[in-house]
Image (spheres, rainbow, N blue to C red):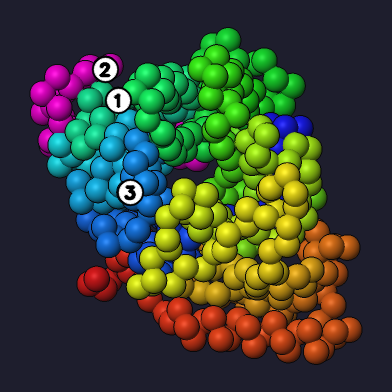
Amino acid sequence: MAAEGVRFTDFYSANAVCSPSRAAMLTGRYPTRCKVPGVLFPRDSHGFPPTEVTIAEILKNAGYATACIGKWHLGHKPEFLPTRQGFDYYWGIPYSNDMWIDKTAPLASDLKLNGGATVEKIRSGAYSKKGGGLKSPHEKFKLPLMLNEEVIEFPVNQTTLTQRYTDETIKFIKTNVNKNKPFFVYLPHAMPHIPLAVTNPFRGKSKQGFYGDTIEELDANVGRLLRALKELNIDDNTLVMFTSDNGPWLGLGELSGSAKPLKGGKFSTHDGGQRVPMIIRWPGKVAAGRVCTQVTSMLDLFPTIATLAGQPLTNDRVIDGQNIWPLLALEEGEVPEKDFFYLYGWDVQAVRSGKWKLQEALGGGSWGLKRKAGQKALYDLESDPGEKTNLADKYPEVFKRLEGLIAEKQKEIGTGIKPGGRKEKGKKK
């Protein structure tokens, strides 16, 4: 894909954890504007507000068939599912693959039950808790597979998800090609989120442990999709993007990825938590083999896709991203540099402006919002991508300017609830 498209070196997810990053990508808005500041859980009764306008809604208005196939993680109640956010079709797990089933989940009349599971146990809440710790095998986590707004299989075999998601995507594409109808597929794979799982042909195939095996299988299935586009003679009429919602979950041995040479990983507003891969490919339309070093982010996808589809942006809300098509086109153009803010919950913890990054705080633990006390740090990310050398004393004017940007953005965003709206101990929500 990189050889046939544009590879970005300084592309950012809008958050260092799943749910807020996805909300921002679909809307072009910082996740706090979407009321999704943190990770959502099966116990939560809230989710992605239906009033938000998504990429799927924009494209549906333009006549596209739309599908979400994979991990949703923006609310599992019916009013928050993909089918209420512009997607004609949904097939996947409603949240992260280290979670569980909500005992009130709507069950299909032809529900497929695996491994001795029963409807009675589902309704009693027997499966409504986390199945294991961070290093537990995938079998410990009992997850529902959904079709549109009903659970059709429980528990799903996680080893099959990467392949089945690809199968379902190719099926959806073929159906709409046969109808001569344009399509949009949002395909958020579960892997390589823990617990890891692969089919037998890929177990032990890589030289990078279990994590490497999942990447091998993911890569093979991306290849299957690209081959399908060629076989259907739509390769030169299909835009394909590949990216990640956040950086790797570190410290889990062979279950972990790596963000090197960047500092930090998932849960962190250091660049290892949010600077992610991005490749965009469209033969004959997007430049092949180009490397883009400009600061860009998931926030830019919504306005870029809307522009390509000839759809106007909504003017009743703030869109934080911008159209970056000139950076992709065969004849490269210019796009204004835009400051990027690193949010953890409602906390604006850092900003990148050009090559400069000011880090004011880090998240306190995986989910908490308490700021860690420490010295503010100014980094030159062009010469120091690993954020090792604090240049605050050497460049006080830059430090002061970026400090002002953070203060201004924090004032605009305000403060709010904990990520995911979770209850604090000893307090009512």
Q: In the rendered structure, which amino acid carries the disc numbered 1? A: Pro
Q: In the rendered structure, which amino acid carries the disc numbered 3? A: Asn
- Please name whichever residue, 107 or 339, is drawn nearer the observer in this view of the structure: 339
Whole-number angstrom distance, CA of label 2 to CA of label 3: 39 Å
Residue drawn where x is 41% and y is 34% of the image: 183
In this figure, which residue is indicated by the disc labeled 1?
A: 155
Q: Quadrant of the N terminus?
A: top right
The percent coordinates of residue 409 (x first, y second) are 54, 81
**Element type at mark 3:** helix
The percent coordinates of residue 415 (x first, y second) are 42, 79
Look at the numbered discs 2 and 1 and tell me whether their residues touch, using CB distance below 8 Å.
yes
* Mark toward the start of the polypeptide (2 vs 1): 2
**Side (left or right) of 376 relative to 13:** right
Instruction: Give neighbour class at mark 3: few <14, some 14-19, many 20+ (Cα, 10 Å).
Output: few
Stretch in magenta? 107-136
In this figure, which residue is indicated by the disc labeled 3?
A: 61
Whole-number angstrom distance, CA of label 1 to CA of label 3: 35 Å
**Element type at mark 2:** loop
Q: Is residue 36 visible?
A: yes
Q: In the rendered structure, which amino acid carries the disc numbered 2? A: Asn
Residue drawn where x is 63% and y is 57% of the image: 324
Whole-number angstrom distance, CA of label 2 to CA of label 1: 6 Å
**Side (left or right) of 180 relative to 295:** left
**Side (left or right) of 94 relative to 32:** left
Instruction: Give neighbour class at mark 1: few <14, some 14-19, many 20+ (Cα, 10 Å).
Output: many
The percent coordinates of residue 342 (x first, y second) are 59, 67
> In the displayed structure, would residue 260 be above or below residue 420?
above
Of circles 1 and 3, the one toward us is 3
- Please name whichever residue, 186 or 22, is drawn nearer the observer in this view of the structure: 186
In this figure, which residue is indicated by the disc labeled 2?
A: 114
